[in-house]
Image: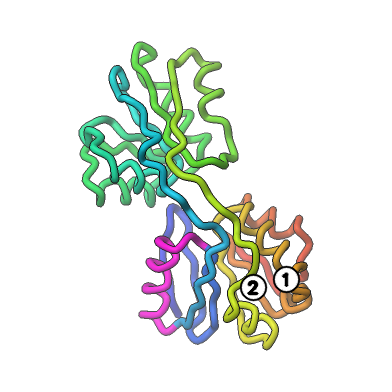
Amino acid sequence: MATFEDAATMFVIPSGELTLITRPLREANILADQLKTAGVPVLIDPLLEVHAHPEALPDLMGITTLVTTSANAIHVLAMTSVDRTLPLWCVGEASGATAKSLGFKNVKIAAGSVQSLLSYLVTEDKNGKILYLRGDVIRFDLKQALLEKGYEIQEACLYRTQEAKAFDKKTLQALERQHLRNVLFFSPRTIRIFTSLCHLHQCVESCRFLRAVCHDSSVMTAAAEEGLPWQEIVLL
């Protein structure tokens, strides 16, 4: 049996069960190594492709605090010549660990949700200036929430994402032959993409043999609402 930790969530994947990882390639490879070491066969089929835009980082003159809810944004930030001693607020332990591994010296960590990050940020000095680093798609408008609380904040979109238009050939074969047992999901958006591709490839019924393994309650809710006939939806 394999276990691996991401943020505050522990997944447990039975050994020998073919598992599909839907994360962008960099994160997918990390998870795949952990699972394969524990005897879990994997397929990697990123449902989102990440395109970095480090040139979107603005002049940091006057910026006193960096904020991000995305490990992808941290990786792009590390491509720049940013001062790595600036305070960098991360949404949770996983993204905080990423920041530290990339050489950021003053990493602050919230409790794993955007709401908790907002709660921590409102303790910051309102005389400072916050730069919010994000991707092109966000689930919560952190900039607007901080503006409403009187903070000076600007944002930079450091990466853009492209949705998969079809399943990889190996994924489709595993679905059609009912070899796949688990699919790992880390966002409601990837649930929606997976559902759309199942309809496109006419393999919806194959989901009756699958367990949707969800990173958090919002992903679990999306899995239920999208209506695929999952064998089981789990939050581990």
Q: Mark 2 belongs to which amino acid?
A: Arg
Which residue type carries mark 1?
Trp
When the figure is inspected, residue 221 is found, relative to residue 209, above or below; the finding is above
Please tell me in which quadrant of the rendered image residue 4 appears. bottom left
Q: Residue at point 77% right, 70% down?
A: 229
> Where residue 104 sits in the image (x, y, percent)?
24, 41
Residue at left offset 66%, top offset 64%? 194
Looking at the image, residue 105 sits to the left or right of residue 74; the answer is left
How crowded pointer 1 is (Cα within 10 Å; few <14, some 14-19, many 20+) is rated as: some
User: x, y percentage for residue 155?
Assistant: 45, 28
Q: Principal SS element in the magenta part? A: helix
Q: CA distance from mark 1 to mark 2?
A: 6 Å
Judged from the image, the secondary structure of the residue bearing numbered disc 1 is loop
Q: Are marks 1 and 2 in contact (CB under 8 Å)?
A: yes
| Residue to which mark 1 is pinned | 230
Extent of the magenta region: 23-39
Instruction: Identify which residue is drawn at 45% across, 16% down.
Output: 151
Image vertical order of residue 46 relative to residue 101, above or below: below
| Image disc number at residue 211 | 2
Residue that appears at 65% across and 57% down: 220
Label 2 CA crowd tier, 10 Å (few <14, some 14–19, many 20+): some
In what quadrant of the picture does the C terminus appear? bottom right
Q: Quadrant of the N terminus?
A: bottom left
The spot of residue 150 in percent (x, y) is 48, 13
Which of the pair 2/28 is nearer the observer?
A: 28
